[in-house]
Image (tube, coloured by chain):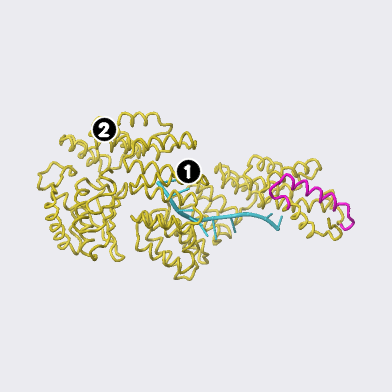
Amino acid sequence: MLLSFVTNKSIHRLCQLSFSSSLFLTNQALHLASEAQSSFSHTQSIPTPSPVTSNCTDYQYYLSFLQLCVTQKALKAGKRLHARLLLSGLGFNTALATKLVNLYCTCNCLPHAHSLFDKISKRNVFLWNILIRAYAWNGPHETAILLYYQMLEHGIGPDNFTFPFVLKACSALSDIGTGREIHKQVIHTRWCSDVYVGAGLIDMYSKCGCVNEACQVFNKILDRDVVLWNSMIAAYSQNGYPRDALILFRDMVYNKVQPTIATLVTVISALAEAAALPRGREIHGFALRYGFGAVDKFKTALLDMYAKSGRVQVARKLFDQLLDRELASWNAMICGYGMHGHAHEAILLFDIMRKKGKIPPNHITFVGVLSACNHGGLMKEGEHFFHLMVNEYSIEPTLQHYTCLINLLGHFQRLGEAYGLIQNMPMKPDSGVWGALLNGCKVHRNIELGELALQKLIELEPTDAGNYVLLSNIYAQSGKWREAARVRKQMKKRGLKKVIASSWIEIKGITHAFLSGDTSHPFLKDIYKELERLEGFMKENGYVPDTNPVYHDVGDDEKFNMVRTHSERLAIAYGIISTPPGTRLLVTKNLRVCEDCHVAIKLISRIVEREIVVRDVNRYHCFVNGDCSCGDYW
DNA sequence: TTAGGGTTAG
């Protein structure tokens, strides 16, 4: 080795060389390093040993070596050096120990990191920060918060690194109390206008569902960077404010802040939730101009949006274009198929994913596959995939997986089994699980079990009027009008109101919302005229109104009037009269599509020769030429 | 002298 000109810099370089030569064999790295070290420690050009270490050059070498261990996450090599340091008495030098704590934290060896941390007597803010960071990232998150308060007790002041780390722990725990307390502390420091701290606060408030407070933090920081904008856009997006997310994005562009891929992915995901395809196309074009169009992460977000806007084939095209498919890409496509009831396509894609074997499916993949089975009415397959998930992939079923299975069992009239499954679940069933059972009871008119499910639902959600409505519907379907009325009375007595059904359609960038029996739209006359025209054709095609979905004890004529002005029909009629022939329509409804409207929309799709997509609260219905993609099963 | 905030699938 060339040791004649060993200086501090060359020691570092030598360390890098010896290290990088054994990147894949980290155990050897230490061997090479110690060889290098023992060689150059005998040369004359080494500086005089410092009082802290037996040999200053050794010490600097070790520091450099450990830093490389941290950047390369070379745990084994670091551990061996740690052992050597202990033997040589250098182990508890603060600088070296700090590097070791950092290494253990980086490699997620928290017990090692913490016990070494405890042995260090002089702990600076950096040392506290890296341990808090490790717990904030890997959990237990409570420990991160505990350490933060211990740090304060030790008289160490938090800095612009500490706050984002500890706030991350609050976000993970949705601990708004601690989050607010830390925010108060931030205000008393010079970090209150720091963009990192600000982003941490916005994220914490967002994850705790406090968008207004997130917005206040955002507004107070005037010197904003792109991540701060992204954080606030994400806060809107994740809390169900897609419009605000889009407005803020436009504001950001107006303020000449260059968007990043994270910005576009966030905005696209907000629009996906709102099924706002035209706005999504606008962002798509924007991304192409900025050169993000070919980025796989962006394409994955885009395919999710197209799938959620009812364009499954476009989504599949995007999926096929991906060069590097991440787990999220597979999941987005499988779930996309699932929500549209394309069960066979979902299963086919899942099989391809498994055969490729590169990326193992996770619990979300199985939510997609199971919901596909559920929406496609594939009982046997649903059971098969549930067992596959547990036995082959060792994935613990979550409430969502159970809900899919209970839905399936309910639809196949295996209500007793569904109830048995609920009783044997390892976790407390939530409202989704009981709701799935209740839905099955409604379809198969099982009053006894339906009542039981409703009792549980009322315990869990005492103010949700939907539960009362469903039970009342079960009674009504069996002609038990008295009981139905009793439930409605009970609901009224408790001051609960049914969620009013509404549907909306976006035409030329404007959202038109309709309530059931709505009379407020400016084109009301034309809408009703169109409905009448369609009804004429529908009757010619054998349409007989099914008034069962109207659960009130009223006369048949009145019932028919109630069905024919259901919000989805008004939205569709408006869509037909305000767009050119052949235009595809996308209608979103806040509740489930009723049976009669389902029959009617199938016929309308044939009469007007248009594809009509209805996204209801559970799934998508794609009506083409008299048929629906759900196969009349939903 | 070391470290950091925002993003896709349910």
Looking at the picture, which amino acid does disc 1 mark? Arg
- Is A489 left or right of A231, judged from the image as shown? left
Mark 1, Cα crowd under 10 Å, few <14 / some 14-19 / many 20+, is few
Horizontal placement of A577 versus A313: left or right? Answer: left
Instruction: Please tell me whether mark 1 sits on a helix, a strand or a loop.
Output: helix
Identify the colour of chain B in the image: cyan
The disc placed on residue A354 is 1
Q: Position of residue A572 (x, y in %)?
A: 22, 57
Magenta residue check for A318: no
Q: Which residue is the site of mark 2? A: A451
Quarter of the image containing the C terminus of chain A? top left
Quarter containing the N terminus of chain A: bottom right
| Residue A471 numbered mark, or none | none
Q: Amino acid at mark 2?
A: Glu
* Residue toward you, A103 or A368: A368
For mark 2, give the secondary structure. helix
Across and down, in percent, residue A621 comes to: 28, 50
Answer left or right for A308 relative to A216: left
Q: Is residue A32 magenta?
A: yes
Residue at the image position 17 percent from the left and 49 percent from the top: A563
State the separation of the CA atoms marked 1 and 2: 42 Å
- Counting residues from the start of the chain, the first of labels 1 and 2 encountered is 1
* Tint of chain A: yellow
Instruction: Determine the image quadrant of residue A273.
Output: bottom left
Q: Position of residue A393 (x, y in %)?
A: 49, 37
Front residue (pair A574, A254):
A574
| In the rendered image, the vertical position of residue A329 relative to residue A284, given as above or below | above
Residue situated in front as seen by the camera: A424 or A318: A318
* Residue A25 position in % (x across, y down): 70, 46
Task: Magenta stretch: give its range.
Answer: A21-45
- Residue at 82 percent across and 60 percent down: it is A7
Q: Badge 1 sits on which subunit?
A: A
